[in-house]
Image (cartoon, rainbow, N blue to C red):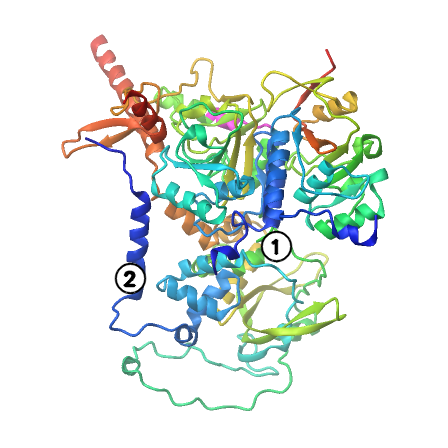
């Protein structure tokens, strides 16, 4: 089958309508997970099929798409997804955060502040924040409907009594618009405060068949306790390439002796800073 | 309207027209009070371009549509059926309902979702004579501080917002423009 | 000096080129044709059609070739292709009572109308490697019997005549479609069967086996196992009647399970059901056992806490494309989440050490 045999952005129109309806309901009830009939995509479940379907339903031919994985544009899965949309939607792509109109991400929020005209699409492996406390969907659905989030607080508090701190470092649960507890996808908790942003945030979980959303300027609160407030932590270093002291850092092992260096995980941010100096 | 025109007025380039229209609808829903242009369809009277475009973008054989009052005409039914295949239904079963505010009411007829599935609620497409950033003061998700939108009936819409996270969601259409009001928006009287 | 890794795109292209070369193998050995795969690896083709939910032996053969014989990868290729196909309509329910059976056995009656027909089975082969096959030996033709003229009745019908087996209510309702709607619990039996039919053979086998070993044991007899071809008919509204659009090979298994009774109902046998594309006997029997285990609620049995009784557990985990995708995604980069764990563990260790030092100083 040739590529021309596929519809714009791969998905057929009926599938896109189904996803689009789910996105609208997701925006109307921020943080609530809308079930959708996720399709079998030509890439494996767990590799961004949810994000890809949401992006495919959202893209227009005029869009400029950026795809990042772990903050980087050049990680292999990001390259693969970008290429998929170049081929099936013919959209322009970019690595520059500011130039992108749609950004699909796995595990990071870009460092540069996103604007009104941008859409951030997250790839989500396990959309249910309560899943690790209760494996049954029938039960967690009930817990959300009754706002029964006590178990989550108990879990976080058990951490404190055991370790003296909350031991969740990524996929740190948030409460959206004062109602639903939501999994922000496995972003480091450093990124949580950025979720109160001007851009539209859409979350797609393909295998688990859920879409959820956070509209712009929506209150997103990381769960915490008065005596143990939430902390957005990062490595206590500056980037060894660009000197940034405000970005999330990757740790790279340099030699057999265990020498380390720290570099920005957001490759575009790092690159832009180095260009500005040069 | 002659017999052939029910086949006309659809999207010229469905994947692209629908993508543009959805972006307008999504942006409107994400930013309550924002008024956006939305075009692509040329529906029969009395439907506005905006309402017709929303129907073609969002409806298909999997969605049930309620045509209220003056919108429930043979030309509209045939046009909708030909272009979307959406089955028509009463207000109580509707995924989408279309009409003027007066024709659509009372709001209590529509599905508001269930505590476990609040998404299973109706979306109302309300045809308006005017659409402007005046009147009711909106705040909540999608709105930086406050926004203003000309709303047909504050009391009813405030009542809907009280049901949150249940409730209906609304598109307001006028000519080729659309605005939206999700159930999550807090509505204040004009100040 | 460290430079951010570039060239992901070239790495991917090179990996694909190498993969293609490995798939072809030694070029001095003749290339496999799709017809060879279809005709000589037909059980692999059947499994790919069954779990890929697409009845097309040639496409399944192509997928097996492209996947280098990795059947789950081949199933994945078929699923991804299937999802893009337009739907012209739905067939009528096939009539397995009218099946032209190649094989038909019952473990519950020594003989019955239609007889016991072994068919092309491995059952009584001695599992000794046949080295003649290594030398490409031609096989002599098998003896032929006159085809049976009349349809072969289902064994359970004979039990039904006496009211000894629970009748299954007929329904004209269109079943929910697992591939077009999100899976939702509780799932009705039609949806469970749909999920099991495309579920991983190994997973369904393991679940079925667990019921036999005592995890929600339901004492199944193979009432009947039949394999053969059935006609597929589709209503054509423009014509006002149904026409035959083709034939499919199916394996059907009905188990007869221990009777149950209640204050209002006399004791009766119950059944489990399996229906799979192609000759897929292990899968069909497994499916029937798991189907029966999942019916505990409607049959008024106790939930014994067994995995095979738990529909959310079984249905959420039986799809090998979902499972393998999620399993294998952990090899994707997780630098960012790992880094945040690394920082946290370092911090917790630092604080713990400080606490110990503080305590020691105080002592």
Residue B49 falls in which quadrant of the image? top right
Residue C183's place in the image compared with B105, above or below, is: below
Residue denoted by label 1: C177
Residue A11 placed where, x, y %? Answer: 54, 49
Determine the residue positioned at 51% across, 49% down.
C316
Q: Residue furthest left?
A: A257
Residue denoted by label 2: C21
Secondary structure found at label 1:
loop
Secondary structure found at label 2:
helix
| Mark 1 chain | C
The majority secondary structure of the magenta stretch comes to helix
Return the residue nearer the eye: C298 or A143: A143
Q: Is residue C211 visible?
A: no
Q: Is C334 left, or right, of C185 in this rendering?
A: left
Residue A215 falls in which quadrant of the image? top right
Q: Give the range drawn in magenta.
A: A147-154
Q: Is A44 left, or right, of C189 in this rendering?
A: left
Q: Rounded to the nearest whole Å, what is the CA distance between mark 2 and mark 1?
A: 39 Å
The mark that comes first in sequence, 2 or 1, is 2
Return the residue nearer the eye: C272 or B51: B51
């Amino acid at each position: 089958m040739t590529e021309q045999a596929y519809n714009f952005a791969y998905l057929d129109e009926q599938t896109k309508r189904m996803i689009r309806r789910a996105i609208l309901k997701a925006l109307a009830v921020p943080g609530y997970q809308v079930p959708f009939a996720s399709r079998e995509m030509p890439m494996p479940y767990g590799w961004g099929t949810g994000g890809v379907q949401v992006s495919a339903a959202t893209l227009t031919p005029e869009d400029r798409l950026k795809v990042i994985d772990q903050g980087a544009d050049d990680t292999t899965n990001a390259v693969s997804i970008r290429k998929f949309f170049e081929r099936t939607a013919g959209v322009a792509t970019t690595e520059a955060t500011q130039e992108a109109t749609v950004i699909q991400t796995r595990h990071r929020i870009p460092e540069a502040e996103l604007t009104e005209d941008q859409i951030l699409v997250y790839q989500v492996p396990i959309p249910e924040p309560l899943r690790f406390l209760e494996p049954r969907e029938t039960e967690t659905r009930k817990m959300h409907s009754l706002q029964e989030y006590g178990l989550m607080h108990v879990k976080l508090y058990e951490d404190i009594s055991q370790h003296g701190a909350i031991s969740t470092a990524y996929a740190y649960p948030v409460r959206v618009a004062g109602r639903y507890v939501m999994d922000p996808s496995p972003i480091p908790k450093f990124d949580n405060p950025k979720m109160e942003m001007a851009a539209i945030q859409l979350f797609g979980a393909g295998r688990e068949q859920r879409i959820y959303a956070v509209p712009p300027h929506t209150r997103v609160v990381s769960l915490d306790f008065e005596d143990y407030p939430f902390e957005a932590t990062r490595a206590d270093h500056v980037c060894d390439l660009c000197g940034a002291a405000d970005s999330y850092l990757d740790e790279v092992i340099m030699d057999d002796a265990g020498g380390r260096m720290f570099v920005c995980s957001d490759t575009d941010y790092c690159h832009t800073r180095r260009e500005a100096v040069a | 309207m002659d017999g052939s025109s029910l086949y006309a007025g659809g999207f010229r380039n469905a994947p692209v027209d629908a993508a543009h229209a959805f972006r307008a609808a999504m942006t409107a829903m994400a930013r309550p009070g924002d008024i956006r242009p939305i075009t692509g369809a040329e529906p029969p009277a009395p439907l506005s371009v905006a309402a017709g475009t929303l129907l073609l973008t969002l409806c298909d054989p999997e969605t049930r549509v309620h045509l209220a009052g003056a919108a429930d005409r043979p030309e509209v039914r045939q046009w909708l059926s030909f272009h979307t295949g959406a089955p028509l239904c009463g207000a109580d079963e509707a995924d989408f309902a279309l009409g003027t505010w007066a024709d659509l009411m009372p709001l209590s007829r529509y599905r508001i979702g269930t505590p476990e599935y609040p998404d299973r609620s109706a979306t109302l497409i309300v045809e308006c004579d005017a659409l402007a950033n005046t009147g009711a003061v909106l705040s909540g998700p999608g709105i930086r501080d406050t926004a203003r939108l000309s709303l047909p009936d504050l009391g009813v819409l405030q009542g809907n917002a009280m049901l949150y996270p249940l409730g209906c969601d609304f598109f307001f259409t006028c000519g080729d423009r659309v605005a939206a009001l999700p159930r999550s928006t807090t509505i204040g009287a004009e100040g | 000096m460290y430079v951010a890794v570039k060239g992901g795109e070239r790495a991917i292209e090179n990996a694909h080129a190498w993969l293609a070369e490995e798939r072809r193998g030694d070029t001095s050995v003749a290339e496999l044709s799709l017809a060879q795969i279809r005709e000589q690896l037909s059980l692999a083709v059947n499994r790919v059609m069954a779990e890929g939910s697409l009845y097309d032996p040639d496409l399944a053969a192509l997928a097996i070739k492209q996947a280098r014989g990795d059947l789950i990868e081949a199933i994945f290729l078929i699923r991804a292709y299937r999802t893009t196909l337009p739907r012209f309509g739905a067939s009528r329910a096939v009539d397995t009572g009218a099946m032209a059976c190649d094989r038909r056995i019952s473990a519950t009656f020594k003989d019955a109308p239609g007889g016991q027909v072994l068919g092309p089975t491995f059952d009584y082969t001695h599992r000794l490697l046949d080295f003649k096959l290594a030398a490409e030996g031609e096989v002599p033709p098998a003896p032929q019997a006159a085809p049976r003229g009349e349809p072969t009745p289902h064994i359970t019908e004979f039990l039904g005549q006496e009211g000894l087996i629970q009748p299954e209510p007929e329904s004209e309702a269109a079943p929910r479609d697992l591939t077009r709607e999100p899976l939702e619990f509780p799932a009705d039996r039609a949806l469970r069967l749909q999920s099991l039919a495309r579920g991983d053979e190994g997973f369904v086998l393991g679940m079925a086996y667990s019921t036999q070993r005592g995890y929600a044991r339901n004492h199944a007899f193979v009432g009947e196992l039949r394999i053969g071809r059935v006609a597929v008919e589709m209503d054509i509204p423009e014509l006002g009647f149904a026409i035959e659009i083709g034939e499919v090979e199916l394996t059907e298994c009905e188990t007869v399970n221990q009777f149950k009774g209640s204050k209002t109902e006399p004791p009766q046998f119950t059944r489990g059901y399996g229906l799979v594309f192609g000759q897929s006997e292990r899968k069909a029997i497994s499916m029937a056992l798991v189907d029966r285990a999942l019916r505990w609620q409607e049959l008024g049995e106790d939930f014994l806490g067994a995995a095979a009784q738990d529909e959310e557990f079984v249905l959420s985990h039986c799809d090998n494309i979902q499972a393998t995708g999620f399993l294998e995604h952990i090899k994707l980069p997780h630098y960012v989440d790992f880094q945040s764990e690394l920082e946290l563990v370092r911090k917790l260790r630092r604080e713990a050490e400080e606490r110990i030092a503080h305590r020691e100083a105080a002592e």
